[in-house]
Image (cartoon, grey):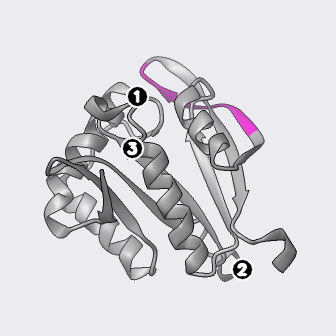
């Protein structure tokens, strides 16, 4: 598996992977998949902020992606980011999410960020919660029943991980 920066010609694969999660899952609260143009705009915004958008490639095929985005627009939040990780349905359980998130954390740490937040859709999303926990995230809260998708109410699980060496604070 190759973890690399997202390329401009990966947009169609992003649309396919994310579209699956929009239609089938609860990890995102979007209900209509974005177009290729909209995804390209989102990628451009992440890049313009100087944050990483990564792709996992296996046998020439995109198996997942991850990116960091600004947590909030106010300047005081500039050292905190939020992660997003999506894996193609055919690549689940193969370590793609872990490889992507591990590299994303390292890149964000290298950029001088101090905190990474995960805002996980659906408290039943055990795979995402376990992935984040395995990489040092701690649950900091659960917002109950704040989204409604596919006929059910959904929670959001908030997790946080420091990107700073505790001895270096």
Residue at the image position 26 percent from the left and 30 percent from the top: 90
On screen, residue 17 above or below 110: above
Q: Earlier in the sequence, mark 3 or mark 2?
A: 2
Q: CA distance from mark 3 to mark 2?
A: 32 Å
Residue range (magenta) = 142-150
Residue at the image position 26 percent from the left and 49 percent from the top: 34
Q: CA distance from mark 3 to mark 1?
A: 18 Å
On screen, residue 145 above or below 117: above
Report which residue position mark 2 lands on: 76
Q: Residue 75: where, in percent of width, then height?
A: 65, 82
| Magenta run includes residue 2 | no
Report which residue position mark 1 lands on: 25
| Magenta run includes residue 146 | yes
Number of on-image labels: 3
Dot 2 crowding, Cα within 10 Å, few <14, some 14–19, many 20+ = few
Residue at the image position 26 percent from the left and 59 percent from the top: 39
Marks 3 and 1: which is nearer the front? 3
Q: Earlier in the sequence, mark 3 or mark 1?
A: 1
Horizontal side of residue 100 vs 38, given as left or right: right
Report which residue position mark 3 lands on: 96
Q: Earlier in the sequence, mark 1 or mark 2?
A: 1
Q: Which mark is residue 122?
A: none
Determine whether the residue tagged by mark 3 lies in a helix, strand or loop.
helix
Q: Residue 130: where, in percent of width, then height?
A: 61, 34
Which residue occupies the extreme top position in the image?
Answer: 151
């Amino acid at each position: 598996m190759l973890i690399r920066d997202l390329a401009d010609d990966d947009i169609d694969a992003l649309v396919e992977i994310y579209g699956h999660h929009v239609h089938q899952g609860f990890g995102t609260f979007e209900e209509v998949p974005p177009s290729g143009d909209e995804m390209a705009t989102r990628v451009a915004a992440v890049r313009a902020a100087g944050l990483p958008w990564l792709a996992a490639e296996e046998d020439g095929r995109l198996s997942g992606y991850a990116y960091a985005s600004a947590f909030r627009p106010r300047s005081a939040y500039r050292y905190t980011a939020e992660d997003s990780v999506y894996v193609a349905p055919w690549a689940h359980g193969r370590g793609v999410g872990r490889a992507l998130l591990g590299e994303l954390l390292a890149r964000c740490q290298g950029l001088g960020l101090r905190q990474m937040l995960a805002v996980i859709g659906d408290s039943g999303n055990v795979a995402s919660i376990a992935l984040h926990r395995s990489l040092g995230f701690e649950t900091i809260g659960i917002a109950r029943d704040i989204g409604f998708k596919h006929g059910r109410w959904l929670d959001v699980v908030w997790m946080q991980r420091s990107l700073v060496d505790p001895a270096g604070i």
